Amino acid sequence: MLKVRPLEDKDYQLIKEAEKVIEKNYRYGRHHIGSAVRTTSGRVFSAVHLEANVGRIAVCGEAMAIGKSISEGENEFETIVAVAHPHPNEDIEKCWVVSPCGMCRELISDYGKNTDVIISYHSKLVKCNVMELLPEKYTKEVE
């Protein structure tokens, strides 16, 4: 069972930032995930994912937001979230929070083991430490 915590007002604002970036930049077949990361200084960076014709080279929204933040000199992360935008053929009206994929869980933890991730858990929006989502994390260190 995950150790989760309720969201704070600033977490709901982070979700709104992720929604804003994908609502502005949604393009079917190119961009349908938006992400936002808040650094420990309080700055927020948002980005969309990059879809590719060859799926393996697609870049997730979380990676884009982390890269944008680091490029601006902010490399200590507090909380991250990703949202999906509905496709035109889906009978869904608004974006929804999605959990990070396995590669993003690794990436987020590589850049900040203390980073919280906003997820939907038992039909509620909550946050947990990224390490809760990645037991037995891969490391380069030999035991």
Image (cartoon, rainbow, N blue to C red):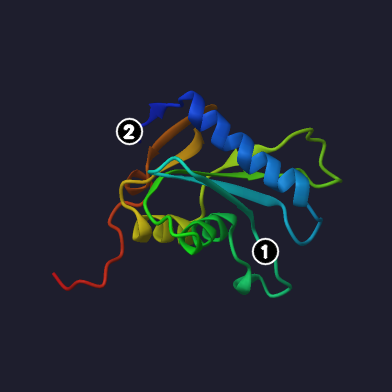
* Dot 1 alpha-carbon crowd within 10 angstroms: few under 14, some 14 to 19, many 20 or more: some
Q: What residue lies at 74% left-to-right and 73% top-to-bottom?
A: 53
User: What residue is pinned by disc 2?
Assistant: 3
User: What residue is pinned by disc 1?
Assistant: 50
Q: Are marks 1 and 2 in contact (CB under 8 Å)?
A: no
**Going from the N terminus, do you reach mark 1 or mark 2 first?**
2
Callout 2: SS: loop
Is 133 above or below relative to 143? above
Residue 99 coordinates in the image, percent (x, y): 52, 45
* Dot 2 alpha-carbon crowd within 10 angstroms: few under 14, some 14 to 19, many 20 or more: few
Please state, as top left, top right, bottom left or bottom right, where the N terminus lies in the image: top left
- Given residues 74 and 116, the one toward you in this image is 74
Is 1 above or below relative to 70? above
Q: What residue lies at 50% left-to-right and 64% top-to-bottom?
A: 71
Residue 105 coordinates in the image, percent (x, y): 43, 55
- Quadrant location of residue 83? top right
